[in-house]
Image: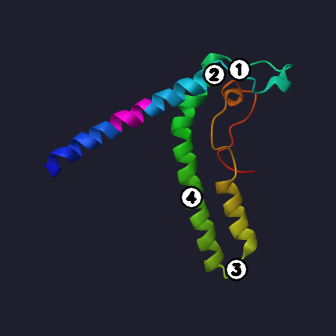
Amino acid sequence: MKSEMAPRNFAVRIRVTALWAIAMFVLAASPLSFGVGTALAGTQEPTTQSKILAVGASCFYLPAKAFYAVFGAATAGLAYGFTLGDDELANQIWTASVEGSYIVTPPMIEGKEPVRFKGP
């Protein structure tokens, strides 16, 4: 009986996760701002299309950037150890891998801001 419940529980978890992801995607792409950013009345509101594209692009960009940052941080730590405490080299590796954009925003999609995969 326990073995029969495991696939069913897994399927339920997958469905709930998929529905949660869809709900977050729709919420992020909705044009409603709920009063957020009212001080920015002079700026042009991003289009719904750029919002949807930003959320979709972030779904792929964020894991890639996180992977790059984690392994870059590990490499910086190894560089620090292997060079017997060379702060400059470790800091250069750390800055290049950990800093930068972690999500894609609508202004990035519209070309108003750069996407910085690597830090400065």
Q: Residue at x 20, y 45 (%)?
A: 5
- Residue 84 point in image, percent of width and height: 67, 82
The label on residue 18 is none
Query: Would you name the residue on which mark 4 appears?
Result: 70
Q: Quick one: which residue is furthest to the front in this view?
A: 1
State how far apart marks 1 and 3 are (Cα).
46 Å
In front of the other: label 4 or label 1? 1
Query: Would you name the residue on which mark 2 appears?
Result: 50
Q: Are marks 1 and 2 in contact (CB under 8 Å)?
A: yes
Q: Please tell me which of labels 4 and 3 falls first in the chain.
A: 4
- Label 4: few (<14), some or many (≥20) within 10 Å? some
State how far apart marks 2 and 4 are (Cα).
29 Å
Q: Please tell me which of labels 2 and 4 falls first in the chain.
A: 2
- Residue 118 point in image, percent of width and height: 67, 49
Q: Please tell me which of labels 3 and 2 falls first in the chain.
A: 2
Q: Does residue 53 show up?
A: no
State how far apart marks 3 and 2 are (Cα).
45 Å
- Residue 91 point in image, percent of width and height: 72, 66
- Residue 9, picture quadrant: top left
Considering the whole magenta stretch, tell me its main secondary structure: helix
Instruction: State which region is magenta.
Output: 14-19
Q: Nearer the viewer, residue 2 or 108?
A: 2
Q: Residue at x 53, y 30 (%)?
A: 24
Q: Nearer the viewer, residue 10 or 71?
A: 10
Q: Residue at x 52, y 36 (%)?
A: 59
* 64 sits to left or right of 48: left
- Mark 4: secondary structure: helix
In front of the other: label 1 or label 3? 1
Amino acid on which disc 3 is placed: Gly
